[in-house]
Amino acid sequence: MNKKNSVLAAGGIFVLMVILICVVNASQGGAYTFAGTFWALVPPLVAIILALVTKEAYSSLFVGVVLGAIMASGVSFTGTLNLITVEGLSDAVAGNAGILIFLVILGIIVALINKSGASRAFGEWAEKNIKTKTGAALATFVLGVLIFIDDYFNCLTVGSVMSPITDSKKISRAKLAYLIDATAAPVCMIAPISSWAAAVSGCVTSEKYSGIELFVRAIPYNFYSILTFVFIITLTLLKFDYGKMKKYEEKAELTGDLGIMGLSDDEEYELKHSGPAEPPKGKLIDLILPVIILIVFCVWGLLFNGFSAIEEGGVIEAFSSTDAYVGLPWGSILALVVVAIYMIARKVVTFEEAMECVPKGFIAMVPAITILTLATSLKNMTNILEAKEFVGNAMANVQGLQWALPAIVFVVACLVSFATGTSWGTFGILIPIVSAIFPETSPLFFVGISACLAGAVCGDHCSPISDTTIMSSAGAHCNHINHVETQLPYAVSVACISFVSFILAGLFEKADLTWVSLPVGICLTIGFLFFMKKRSSKA
């Protein structure tokens, strides 16, 4: 479908949905309540469909926001405008203010590193020490796993650090975005010391287990996160790709077109060669040290905020009580000051050049900020329409088939997270329901909790309106829709294998062999990739 036809199709879908909403509302005398019904899921689903059809995220998200506002206002013109501007866009900016600050500061630090020539120095070092495409991909994966504190921090840091290496080995930005996205949320979801562990702990209402204890016990059954790592390592070692990713990788290898944000040739050259005139003053240490400084101060910010919120307790309790929207900006602001002073003292940048990096860093993050704001506005609309309550009521009515419940929970969590674009919101509503479905004395209790968490990560990983998907695109400087459509076949492949693993865990529960489901899942993942490589070689 060409661009003109896709725009016409998008416009047709929007008009049709507006007419349908108006007809449904009028049929009830103008008093139909869309909240708490299946209609609550329509705005995000329409936004997702439009994004995949038009390959354009901004308008697709805005259409979803408008549809949600029309329904939430009861088809009122002034009410719709008020919801879009206040509960939608304004609340999205206010609610994400801390993360938006963090994004801008991170953009400024990256601009400082580029201006110093440290990125170029790192690229030269990589050319000498990382010899192969496989090595570059594995190095990206390892760095992603090591930065397990927070997914936003992971996405943007890994992208800025590893892009010079992956570019030199002709790895497309779509593949880089996948490597970033596939290690960001999944590693945070199995790391006991992370902002995600804190969020999960806050949702737990168990009388027998503390939040962090329940999180740790659920880790071995988080099949999607663990199998995603197995998938990446095996795929990289087998040196092949499939689906749309294969086309992007072949294009990068044959033509050198890495697909950097759809930029013009001049803009792409500027992005690749930003920095001082030759010879660059920056050394490898000028990239490593700022990253370490950023990590140290961000961890400090998270811990300081956490300890401020509790009267007593240790590091785990502090992480359980921290607010990443406050701790990350604290740490990044201090890191920016220290990094700027360091760069100027090292004379790799002047004070004037450092100040020039402020607007450059902000501009670099404008696309991510815009999409994140629109995506959050859409989430606000689904919250007003009580989408979570609708899904929660549907799940609470599930009866029988106890052995299949973990798999059912996984699928429901995937769908909710995909449609709403939020992992945290998904497990926030589902964990209390799962806790009620499975007795705490049953081995399936931990499997059920893990199914909820794994499904939330999986749906978030696939969704084009997910904040971590958006951040991964931003970190890799990759077109957002290109990232979504190339990683979707990989994520769905792992999701299918995870579904089978949860079925097996339910079946093995009576024999007390639930642990067998993980090694079986690993074997299935590796076997599937060998099959796909053989099939790909025949194509």
Image (spheres, grey):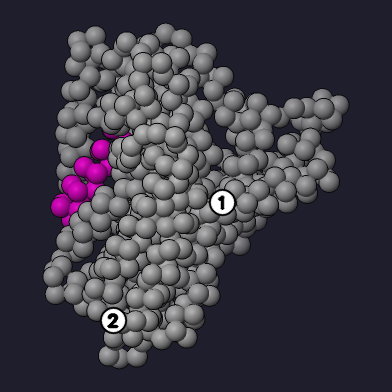
Q: Which residue is mark 1?
A: 96
Residue 74 position, x and y percent, is 79, 35
Magenta span contains residue 241: yes
> Height in image: 521 above or below 297?
above
At x 32% / y 63%, what residue is drawn?
293
How far across and how far down the image is residue 536, in percent?
22, 50
Residue segment shown in magenta: 223-242
Q: Foreground residue, 340 or 310?
A: 310
- Residue pointed to by mark 2: 282
User: Which residue is at a point 50% across and 50% down the rendered structure image?
Assistant: 326
Q: Does residue 272 belong to the magenta stretch? A: no
Is residue 248 something one can see in this rendering?
Answer: no
Q: Is residue 31 above or below residue 181?
A: above
Tell me if residue 517 can be seen: yes
347 to 468, vertically: above or below: below
Which amino acid type corresponds to the residue marked 1 in the rendered image? Asn
Hey, which quadrant is residue 130 in on the image? bottom left
Tell which of 393 and 291 is nearer to you. Answer: 291
Q: Is residue 513 left or right of residue 301?
A: left
Q: Quadrant of residue 179?
A: bottom left
- Direction from residue 357 to residue 33 in the image, left or right: right
Q: Residue furthest bottom?
A: 278
Whole-number angstrom distance, CA of label 2 to CA of label 1: 34 Å
Circle number at residue 372: none
Residue in view at x 34 percent, y 90 percent? 277
- All told, the count of numbered labels is 2
Q: Residue at x 36, y 24 (%)?
A: 210
Look at label 2 and name its amino acid. Gly
Residue 246: horizontal and vertical position, in percent? 30, 57
Residue 285: image quadrant is: bottom left
Q: What is the magenta segment's predominant secondary structure?
A: helix
